[in-house]
Amino acid sequence: MWLKTLLFISAVLINLPAWAQPPNDDCAQAKVIEDVANYCSADQEFSTLNAIDGDAWFAFTARSFDVNISISGNTDGTGNLGGTLQNPIVEIFTNCNTANIVASTISSDNVTTLYKGGLIIGNVYNVRVSGSNKGSFKLCINNYTPVFKPGQDCSSASVLCSKQSFTQTDVSGGGLNSDEAAGTCLAAFGVNSEQNSAWYKWTAANSGTLTFTITPTANDDTDWVLYDLGTSDNCLTSSATAIRCNAGRGVDCFGPGQQRFTKTGLNLTSVDLNENGGCMEGQDGFVRFVSMQQDHIYALLVNNFDRGNNGFTIEFGGTGEFVGPQAVIDFKQNNACTPEQDFTFTSISKNYNRLKWTFGESANIDSSNSEDPVTVRYTTSGVKTVVLQAFGDKDCSVVSTKTFTVSLKPDVPVINANQLSFCLNQTITLSTESMEGATYNWNGPNGFTSNKPIANILVSDYNVAGNYNLLVTINGCTSDAAEITIDPIQTTPVITLEVTENNPCTKNTTFNIDYKVKDFQEVTTNFGNGARINSGSGNGPFVVSYDTPGSRTIIISARGETGCEVTATKIIDVPVLPLQPTIQINKDIFCVSDTIVLTTPQLPNTTYFWQGPNNFSSAEATVRIPITNLNQAGAYFLVATLGKCTSEAVQIVIPEIFKNPVAAFTTEPEIPNRLTAPVSVKFTNNSTDADAFSWDFGDGATSTEVNPEHVYSTFGTFTIRLNASKNQVCNNSVTRGTFIITADNTIFIPNTFTPNADLFNDEFVVTISNISTYNIKIFNRYGSPLYQSNDAFDHWKGIYNDELLPVGTYFYIINATSLSGEKILESGSISIIK
């Protein structure tokens, strides 16, 4: 590639997946690659990390003569393309017990490619991958029919006679004329247009589309030119006959709009006809497909500008075909499954010059070039593969294979039985040797069939006796029938047993045991531990009771005249009658908002169920019932269940639930207030749902009267508390304040205050004593009301509409009534200052 891209890489962060020990780190557990026609794994799909011997194993069955195996390790230095394996090593083996086969390998830039020809079609080959470290890698395998090694000039091009994919290895050098691509997109200033090139030719068998994909064996740049030579096969090519060309570089492109790629070719979606050299925006390695014309000759030049000794795999597609031979095998098996069997192979190939047959392992004829039918015998059984190679012009060839199995009729199988005679309810087990690849066909009395090497037949009745036959089929060959005779089933006792429970879950619980036996000689019974027969004798029926509760097994055994024994069992549960539970309660009297707590001791294996007022139910041993209304009073019932038995119910009655009192009172004079000592205050009780009261006047004095009167004779600030109760259980209290008792009756109105939240003089505090009513109003200088209150203790804070008023002068009017009924009127100004 003549245009290079310079990359500046400052740092690379490698994020590696977590690898467990690979399952294919031993030849015996090799991973089978089923389809090895152009198989490629994903980058980093396989790994030798944590492998015991640092290797990974694979296996494949050869379908063509040649194989190309490519292992891509750390090809770009990041571990993202290919993987992290360094200096990959790849080896090929015929099995797990032999040394590796000598093969051609080439390694470059952590890509190792192995080529091996002459594979035996149908044989299994093993592949071992390792490296100088343990790491991940990408695996590609192509098993293909080889083309003749291509020339490096058009005149020595390899002729393709089919669209079968193939792999080309060891591409190195530009040939005798290393500038045959001059004038195409491969042309470069100062150098020839070919460095490491391979040429191919084919003739179109029909008019149709052509696509192809070229995949380098290493992550490398590959360029190509496709020529239409017309019908003359003239190798004096010129740029005028080049119908498609691609020199685009994608292996190391990182710029805006540039795509990274290594594959290149023709596809059905591209619209461009050429891609020029370099990392060009929008180039993806593919150009528009070609519509081939019948009988035209086409030449393909594939070139690697950068380096030699690497190869590529090419796959063809489209509706157009190549002129060439067709190899087709007709197969006939004669005297199947007998020692005299043989196989007739007939070629119905077309357009060939010569044929080559290869008949495979143990054939009496190794190979043949006959165009007539060939009949072959094999000395060993097993899977065989016959190969027909048809050669066309210039010795190009195609291959067809036929895989089949040589098998003889199996020997008559040997049938074994588990015993000689059988009773009812036993199991007849018939078995024969288990053989790999075999199918089994049993049949017998009552329509019995089975396809297993071991057949089990339940002796459910006397009709299962008789002849049982077995056929074994291996590889399409079926044995003669084997037969075994099961003698008549011996007479076996039949027992019917019925057990019923009487008076369940009571102290008088008993069980009726009734059994009947026929075809017997002897009967024994066992009714279980602690059984007491209340009535019955001989063969019953019996009425039985038990001393202790628990599980019992009733056993009736019978033996027939021929020794067949039968046992019937019945498991019963002798119940435990649970004791009537006891109930504990947390208190005797309840108020609304209390919680009723009911508890019963939790006994082993016992469950409980509560029911009560307001649709209450619970399955807990301890229940907590928040009281929200008066309807929760009443009877609560509890039963205990042990096994299938439930105790008699026990109840507890919750008495009438009382409302919670509401404590409330008023005073005369009204509270809050400032008063002068001595002063008498009347207390009016407004409480509800209470029958007892307790007053605390705040000065150390108390009272239990309903509506007391109290004289304050000491100075101070006093808060009054009233507690109201019902039945000495339900309580509610209220506290109101305050009375400020002073020595004299004064009125003090300040003329300034500073509402600046410094906790000093923040409010307009009016001091006035011995009043029964009070009202204050604040105005601005325009007479607009700013504040009013009827509470002498609700002081103005200089606020209007939730905002602090500015510094200035405001005006107040105070209207009050003294305790003696005199009117008090005060007015003036109040200033807000800083």
Image (cartoon, rainbow, N blue to C red):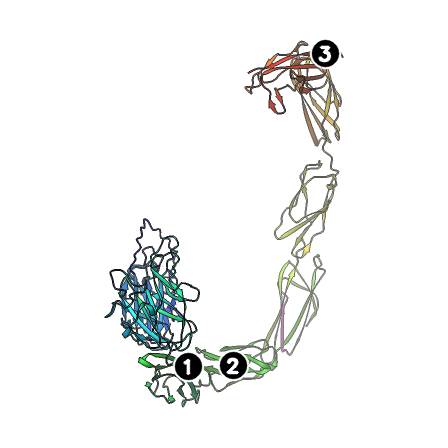
Pick out the residue farthest to the left. 176
Select label 1 or label 2 by which is in front.
1
Quarter placement of the N terminus: bottom left
Q: Which residue has dot 1 on it?
A: 404
Q: Is residue 728 visible?
A: yes
Three-letter amino acid code at disc 2? Asn
Q: Position of residue 455 (x, y in %)?
A: 52, 77
Callout 1: 10 Å neighbours few (<14), some, many (20+)?
Answer: some
Q: Is residue 25 visible?
A: no
Q: Position of residue 175 (x, y in %)?
A: 24, 70
Q: CA distance from mark 1 to mark 3?
A: 128 Å
Q: Which residue has dot 3 on it?
A: 824
Three-letter amino acid code at disc 3? Ile
Three-letter amino acid code at disc 1? Phe
Q: Which residue has dot 2 on it?
A: 441
Query: Hey, which quadrant is residue 670 in on the image?
Result: top right
Among numbered discs 1 and 2, the one appearing first in the sequence: 1
Query: Hey, which quadrant is residue 251 in on the image?
Result: bottom left
Secondary element at image label 3: strand
Residue 523 is one of the magenta-drawn residues: yes
472, above or below 589, in the image: below
Q: Position of residue 177 (x, y in %)?
A: 24, 69
Q: Which residues are magenta?
A: 519-527
Query: Hey, which quadrant is residue 462 in on the image?
Result: bottom right
Q: Which is more toward the observer, 265 or 568?
A: 265
Residue 207 is one of the magenta-drawn residues: no
793, above or below 537, in the image: above
Residue ID at (67%, 53%):
641
